[in-house]
Amino acid sequence: MELWIASSNPGKLQEMRTLLADLPITIKAQNDIPHYSSPDETGDTFIANARIKAKPIHVLRPDAWVLADDSGLECEGLNHLPGVHSARYAGPKATDKENVAKLLKMLQIRTTNRKACFKCVLVAYSPSGEEFVFDGQLNGTIAIKQSGMGGFGYDPVFIPEGQTKTLAELTSAEKNKISHRGLALRLFKDKLKQNL
Ligand code: IMP
């Protein structure tokens, strides 16, 4: 059995491969499909965008399981932005560094409330076409400056609740244990195990 992951984000793929590595399944990513180009994420919710990513792969690989993650950072003091726009907060082709710089600037200008959360929604399609949805959330605060070299995206400025370090200062195993993606993936894994 194959599991196709509908993502080209190296940080996400690394975390998903690690967490699913012990399953008796062959993991493939959308980049393994020649000339595949990702659909535009035009949805205004995480679930809508996860479906937009998963559906075309389900059509191309109907005999496999397909899994898509849509995730992002919501800041209380910024009306829950960047949210679904997290990957493109500083512009359509923004780098992680540019997005983090914009986030720190917006928080500095707009608010003293640095509470935030990461959200992850996973949409999975089984070979019979059944849809499964799982989610996970990690609460925390946004640091004043960046620290740490691990992870990706906003990890260098996100301090999980109850911790003093940013996600980028944790090991990947420590991050996976508490993260929004780790939580959602463990739910998906349980479902997959029952269906293999
Ligand atoms: P998308 O799901 O492809 O739209 O992108 C999600 C974006 O949210 C990523 O590019 C990151 O900027 C951010 N993000 C999601 N999950 C994480 C995480 O675990 N750490 C840091 N940033 C994340």
Image (tube, rainbow, N blue to C red):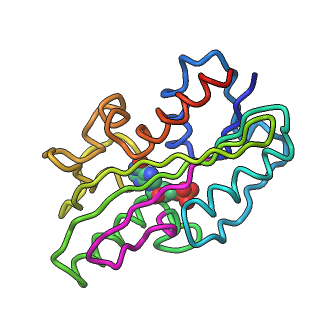
Classify the position of the N terminus by image quarter.
Answer: top right
Residue 153 makes an appearance in the image: no
Foreground residue among 95 and 173: 173
- Residue at coordinates 24% horizontally, 84% vertically from top-left? 110
Residue 70 is covered by the magenta coloring = yes
Location of residue 175 in the rendering, given as x and y in whole percent from the top left corner: 33, 37
* Residue 114, x across and y down, in percent: 20, 68
The mark tally for this picture is 0
Q: Is residue 112 above or below residue 33?
A: below
**Residue ID at (61%, 23%):** 194
At horizontal 19% and vertical 50% (from top left) the residue drawn is 161
Q: What is the quadrant of the C terminus in the image?
A: top right
In the rendered image, residue 35 lying in the magenta stretch gets the answer: no
Q: Position of residue 75 (x, y in %)?
A: 31, 69
Q: Quadrant of residue 66?
A: top right
Can you see residue 94? yes
Q: Which residue is pictured at 54% across the width and 29% down the height?
A: 189
- Rendering coords of residue 18 (x, y %): 49, 27
Which residue ends up furthest to the bottom in the rendered image?
110
In the image: residue 22, left or right of residue 31:
left
| Pick the front one: 55 or 144 | 55
- Relative to 63, say whether 120 is above or below: below
Magenta-drawn segment? 68-86
Report the side of 33 relative to 162 (left or right): right
- Residue 85 or residue 181, whichever sits in front: 181
In which quarter of the view is residue 128 placed?
top right
